[in-house]
Image (cartoon, grey):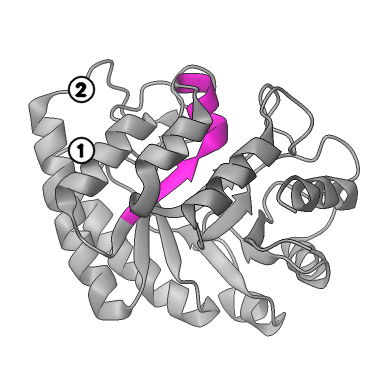
Amino acid sequence: MTDFDLAVCAEMVFRDLPILERVRRIDELGFAVEIWSWDDKDLAALAGTGARFSSMTGYLQGDLIDPLSADEVVRTAELSIKAAETLGVPRLNLHTAELVDGRAARPRQRATGQMWLTAQRSLERIGELGAAAGVTFCVENLNSIVDHPGVPLARAKDTLALVEGVGHPNVTMMLDLYHAQIGEGNLVELVRRCGAAIGEIQVADVPGRCEPGTGEIHYPAIAKALREMGYAGPIGLEAWASGDSEAALEAFRAAFS
């Protein structure tokens, strides 16, 4: 048994099955379900599976840090809220920059004060949208070394600074420990530092981005630290299955049991 609320990203496991069947399998195994994009899916059909959905993408386009396109993030965040209502999704995921095939749509090699200010102001507006709709927006940290080159303000320490600077209860962190291990490390101290700013934790092992136990991260130690902190939020497996998907999900459950 686990005392954590565990979820699994349907985009990355059971990949030989259609998305509806993936969702059903994850639900049957006792996990909540996460998806990435929603605009390319039949939301009514997903809702009809009866699965519990934990999070999904909270915008469609635009850069949170760019005055020229931040309004698009806010506009499509409103659309995401409407989509979330169909699935009962409580958390919507944001990045500091738009991604296309994992890369920054408009790469930047350095952060500026204008980027910080624009991101903070945009998140304040999005927080108000979330409060009105009863959903939480989570800003995800990324790594720009392996998976997401060209994304500014991507490290966990940056997303934490943004969330704490906004200071809105409907704007939190999507603390992705896979990305943090590549970009920063010292994960136990990182989760302790982020503390109340965390809206959700996502996990995968390093290298390879597969389930816990396939790489260098000792997830049972992180689970212990989270229990000591009294963390009661969700933990999502955003990882490829190294082999059999069902076995990967059980390894994930075991790491947090």
- Image coords of residue 204 (percent x, y): 65, 37
Task: Answer above or below: position of 49 versus 58.
Answer: below
Q: Residues within 10 Å of mark 1 (few under 14, many from 20)?
A: many
Q: Quadrant of the C terminus?
A: bottom right
Calculate the distance from the C-alpha at mark 2 to the C-alpha at mark 1.
Answer: 9 Å
Residue 50 sits inside the magenta stretch: no
- Image coords of residue 90 (percent x, y): 45, 71
Judging depth in this view, the residue of 143 and 59 nearest the camera is: 143
Determine which residue is flagged by label 1: 65
The residue range painted magenta reads 172-183
Q: Is residue 78 left or right of residue 19?
A: left
Residue at left 22%, top 47%? 164
Disc nearer the start of the sequence (2/1): 1
Q: Give the amino acid at mark 1.
A: Ile
Judging depth in this view, the residue of 2 and 179 nearest the camera is: 2
Residue at left 74%, top 24%? 215
